[in-house]
Image (cartoon, rainbow, N blue to C red):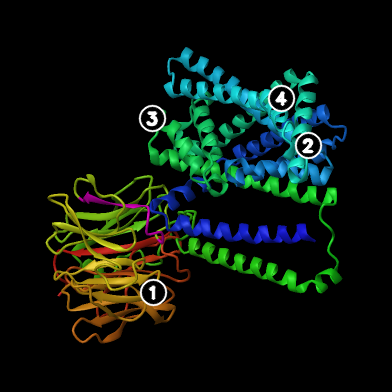
Amino acid sequence: MQTLSKLLLSIAISIGLLGILIRFTLSSAEPALWSSLVSILLSFSLSSVLLYLAISLIKAGLQSFRFRLLIRASDSAVPSLLHIYLVTVARNMFVDMLPARVGELSYIAMLNRGCRVRAESCVSSLAISFVFDLIALGILLLALLVVQIAGGHLQGWMIGAMGMLALLIVFLLVLLYPAVALLNRVIGARGWFRRGVLSRGRDLLIKIQQALEATRAAGITGQLTLLSVCVRVTKYVALYVLFIGVASVHYPEMTVSIARVLPALVSAEVGASLPVPAFMGFGTYEAGGMLALTVLGASASVSLMVMLAVHVISQIIDYGLGGVGFILFLFMTGTTAAVSGAGLRGNWKRWAPLFILIVLAALFMLYEVRAVKKRGTLRPPDQGLAVIPADTDMDQRLREIDGFIVWSSNRSGNHDIYLKSFPDGKMRQLTSHPHSEYFPRISPDGNRIVFARSHEPWVSQRNVFGWDVWLLDIDTGSERLVARNGNVPTWSEDGNSVYFQRNANQVVEHDLNSGTERVLYQSGVSVQVAPKTELQTPDVDASGRLAVTFRGTMRATAVVDPGGAVRQTGNGCQLTWGHDGSYLYKIDHGGRKENALYRIDAATHAIELWFDAPGDYSHEYFPKVANTGDVLVYGASSEGHEHDTADYEIFVWVIGEAEPVRITHHTGNDCWPDVFMRTPLR
C-alpha cells in the first residue's frame, strides 16, 4: 500500500515536471530553440531509434550478468537473472534521473528489500561495478588516443582526461580495499563504536570489507573487465547510432566516425554525472557534449541542438524501459500489495489527494501541450495540385489593373514567394530556398520586397520565433539578409527602413542604409501591456503609430501611440493601416463563414463591416490594400482556418464592387498576399 502510494505520487510529479519542462522550453531565452528542436525530433531516423533500443536491451543484459557474477562471489542468495535484469533497467533510470549518482541507491534498495540480498553484497557489487566501469572507460579512451594519434587529429584535452581518470581509478581501488580495512581497524579500537547505532554501522562496514575480500578472492577480475568493456562498447555504440540518426537529416557534416564523436558522448555523460541538481541531467549533459563537438568544428548552436535531441530521445526510451522494469519488479517480488476495493474505500482520505494531484498534473500538462499546438502544426502541409478554373479567360477587371501581386505558396513543395503581374497575367516564382518563406511586403517604389524566411526547413507561421527578415530585388532576384530573429516585416513610408517583430514582444526599426536598429515598441516598456504580450503583425504608419494584434496575455487589436498609450479597437486580428492612414482594417468574426473584413475610422474609431465575400470562399484572411487605395488582395478558404496548411486561395477585390476575382487555383496553401499598383484604377 505504501509503495503504491509513492508510485502514484511519483507519477503525478513526473507529469507535472513534463509540463514545466514544456513551459520552460517555450519561454526559453533562445526563442528559436523550440522550432529547431521540434524540427530535428520530427525528422530523426526511426531505424536508428529501434537499433538504439535493441542495443540498450543487450547492454542491460551484460550489466545484469556482471551484477550477478559479483553477488555470487560474496552472497549465497543469488536472485534469478530476470530479477537482476529488472533491477538493472530500473537502476539505469534512477541514476539518470537523480544528480551525483544518488540513483545508485535504488539498486541497493531493490535487491535488499525485494530479493533479500544482503546489504553488504549490494554495496560491494555496486562499488566494484562502478570501478570496473571506469577501468573499461579508461581502456576505451586509451584505444581512442591511439586512433587519434594514428589519424593525426589528436585532441589534447583527451590526454588530461585520461590522466585524471587514471588517478580516480587508483583512488577508488585504494578506498575499496586498504582504506576500508584500515578504517575497520581504527574504529574497532574505539569502544564507543561497540554499542547503539554506531555498533550497527561498524558491523555493516565489517561485512562490506568481507564481501569485497570475497569478491577479490573469487578470481573473476578477467571476467569483470571483459563484461565491463562490453557494457561500455554497447553503451557508446547505441548512443552513436542515435547520434547519427539525429544529425544525418539536418547536419550531415556531423556524421563522422565514432572515433571522433565518442569524446562528445563521453563528455556528455560526465557532465550529467556531475553533482549538479539538474533533473534528468538536462543542461549538464548538453554542456558536456557541446564542449567536445565544438572541437570538431561544429557551431555551439548546432552542437546544442543535436545533443539535446539525442538526450530527449534516449531519455524517453531509457525511462520507458526503466518504468516497465520497475513496475514488473514490484509485482514479481511482492514488494507492493494488491489493493482491494474495500482497501481503497476504507482509505479514501489517503488516496483521494493522490488521484486529485495526478488529475491536476495531467490537466496542467495538457494545457502546456495545447500551448505547443498553438505554435502551429509540426509538419508541413501537402503541396497540393493545380486546379483548372472553369473560366480560363481573365476577368475584364484584371485587364484594367497595371501592377502586380506577390504572395507565399507551398505549391513547389515548401512555401516560396510568387509574383503575378497584370494586365498580362504572367506568374513567376521569386524564391526557391529550401526553407519556408512568407509575409512578402512590396516597397513603396515597387522594386523590392521584404519577407520572412525560417531558420529550419519547416517552421509554422503561427510560431513567431525562428525567422529572419530578408530583402529581394524583384528585377535581379538578388537577396540579402536584413535582420536575424525577425518576423512579419513591413516598410516605412519612404522605403529607407523596415519594421519587424522580434522576440514576439518587440517592434524594431532597421535602417537599410546604415544597418542600425532601434526598438520602437516593447510590451511592458513602451507599450502599456504585460511584458510577455505578443505584438503580432505590427504595422507602423507615417506618424509612428502602431497598429497591432495583442496575443498571449490578452486578445485584442489596438492602436499604440509613440508615447505608449493604447487604444483598443475590439477583437479580431491582422489590424493594418489603410493606404493614407485615415482608416484601419482587420479580420474579425461575423461573416458568412465566420470571418469578415472590418473598416475602422482612424478619427472617430467607428467600426463597420467592410467586406464579406459571397460564395464558398468566404473565410477571409490576410487582407492588404494597394498603395493606391482602390484594390484589396486577400486569402480565403471554403473550409479550414490554419494560416499555412488550409487551402486558401488569393482573391482581388476592386473596393466597392460586389464580386471579387479569384487569382489562384491550387489545392495547396496560398497566403499573405500584397499588391502594388503603378496607376490608380480611377
Q: Are marks 3 and 2 in contact (CB under 8 Å)?
A: no
Nearer to me, 526 or 591: 526
Nearer to me, 199 or 438: 199
Mark 4 or mark 2, earlier in chain: 2
Q: Are marks 4 and 2 in contact (CB under 8 Å)?
A: no
Q: Is residue 476 visible?
A: yes
User: Which is more foreground, mark 4 or mark 3?
Assistant: 4
**Rendered residue at 24%/77% (across/down):** 584
Amino acid carrying mark 2 in the image: Asp
Mark 4 or mark 3, earlier in chain: 4
Q: Which residue matches tag 2?
A: 203
Which residues are the magenta region? Answer: 462-474
Mark 3 or mark 2, earlier in chain: 2
User: Which is more foreground, mark 1 or mark 2?
Assistant: 2
Amino acid carrying mark 3 in the image: Gly
| Distance between mark 4 and mark 3 Cα atoms | 34 Å
Is-magenta flag for residue 534?
no
Look at the image and tell me in which quarter the C terminus lies: bottom left
Instruction: Count numbered badges in the picture.
Output: 4
Assess disc 3: are there few (<14), some (14-19) or many (≥20) residues with their C-alpha within 10 Å of its C-alpha. Answer: few
Amino acid carrying mark 4 in the image: Leu
Residue placed furthest toward the top? 150
Q: Which residue matches tag 1?
A: 554
In the rendered image, residue 462, in percent from the top left (x then y), is placed at: 41, 62
Is-magenta flag for residue 471?
yes
For label 4, the SS is helix
Assess disc 1: are there few (<14), some (14-19) or many (≥20) residues with their C-alpha within 10 Å of its C-alpha. Answer: few
Q: Which residue matches tag 4?
A: 227
Q: Which residue matches tag 3?
A: 297
